[in-house]
Image: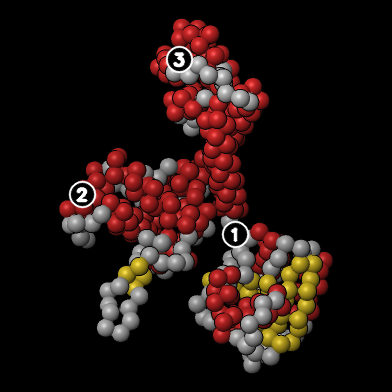
Amino acid sequence: MTAIWAGIDAGKTHHHCVVVDDTGKRLLPRRVTNAEPELLRLLVDVLALGDEVTWGVDLADGGAALLIDLLLNHGQHTLYIPGMAVNRASEGYRGEGKTDAKDAAIIADQARIRRDLQPLRPGDELVTELKILTVHRRDLTDDRTRAINRLRGRLTGIFPALERALDLTNAGPLVVLTGYQTPAAIRRTGIRRLETWLRNRKVRGAAQLAQAAVEAAESQHTSVTGEKPTAQLVHTLEREVMRLNEQIAETDKLIEARFREHKHAEVIASMPGIGPLMGAEFLAATGGDMTAFATPDRLAGFAGVAPTPRDSGKISGNLHRPKRYSRGLQRVFCTSALISIRCCEESRRFYDRKRAEGKRHTRAVLALARRRVNVLGALLRDGRCYESIPPVTTAA
């Protein structure tokens, strides 16, 4: 039986493929278009070179999504090699140049000699939808942050007192800017009329908001040069922020609805501090398959909440944060740990104990996040929900 390894350096429009045998000899270099007919022809030609083929790719989604689905649908054994691993491995090969063909050859050779690479598996449709929705929500929140920063900058240019008085991350202050952007306009309206105007638009805390806006207007009687066009830009940016808020709210509803359909949704959501959104991010990061992590230690390492040793010579116990981990999964465990400190007595006691041991706030939160990895892994393994008092097991 002839075994061969095919490495693919994936791109947006084209992929580079290099096939090697068990000695590392190159059998087939080819550049193919990222289109189904071309990829199917490549699959046929590679299968004709050997009896057992192992594929290696440096992307798990994006431009390689079509390629990966074609390989998995045809029952091909496919390994994922991160781009950083390919970059570091290239230092051990001859030549300092970097080309897509060389990267493809390195991917094929790494798939041949390494035994610790993660195989790609057919994705769960529900988990794939959650991954798409959570990534889309993250893009929307990034866009909203940029729009709010631009809005703050424009408003500071003509009305700095109002920018300081309003929290533009909330809906109420944005409603104020829909009708009033300058100090003169707010002064002419007055507190009572502005409060009534806000109440008619169902703004919470209308009285306090109106008073803060009028006080800011009373502190500035100078009309800044370029006030009129800047006020128009403030109105436009405010509309953009409100539109993004609506899109984020709609996306949150979709994420929650799809998350509730997952078989592990009830178990994950039972953990203090983890709601539908963080639960969806957890499923998107892990694929919803806990069998990929043999032990909680591996899950903790993947989440970036377990330190890695960097010992050398007589130096031991030198622990540092890992460099390779899922930042999305780390955000889930660390953020949920912060929330659980406020809403869960057990988490609060654990945090206080770590603080009493002399750990700083960040270290105590990481320790709590690491402990929660063990708890959630045990709950998913046993298929039961979280309980503040663990059930008592009686001997048979």
Q: Residue at x 52, y 14 (%)?
A: 186
Residue marked by disc 1: 123
Q: Quadrant of the N terminus?
A: bottom right
Query: Which quadrant of the structure image shows residue 304?
Result: bottom left
- For disc 2, the neighbor class at 10 Å (few under 14, some 14 to 19, many from 20) is some
Q: Residues under labels 2 and 1: Cα distance?
A: 41 Å
* Residue with the mark numbered 3: 218
Q: Position of residue 142 (x, y in %)?
A: 56, 44
Give the side of residue 268 with respect to residue 347, left or right.
right
Query: In this view, which residue lies farthest toward the bottom?
Result: 23
- For the point 39% across and 52% down, the residue is 333
> How was this image coloured?
secondary structure
Q: Is residue 218 visible?
A: yes
Secondary structure of the residue carrying numbered label 2: helix
Quadrant where the C terminus sits is bottom left
Contact (Cβ within 8 Å) of mark 2 with mark 3: no
Q: Amino acid at mark 3?
A: Glu
Residue type of the residue flagged with mark 1: Gly
Q: Quadrant of residue 22?
A: bottom right
Between 358 and 10, the one lying in front of the other is: 358
Q: Residues within 10 Å of mark 3 (few under 14, many from 20)?
A: few
* Residue 23 vertical placement versus 133 (above, below): below
Q: Position of residue 119 (x, y in %)?
A: 56, 71
Identified at 39% across, 48% down, the residue is 335
Front one among 395 and 10:
10
From mark 2 to mark 3, how far is it between C-alphas?
A: 47 Å
Between residues 254 and 16, which one lies in front from this camera angle? 16
Spatial CA distance of label 1 from label 3 is 60 Å
Of labels 2 and 1, earlier in sequence is: 1
Residue 352: which disc?
Answer: 2
Mark 2 belongs to which amino acid? Asp
Q: Nearer the viewer, mark 2 or mark 1?
A: 2
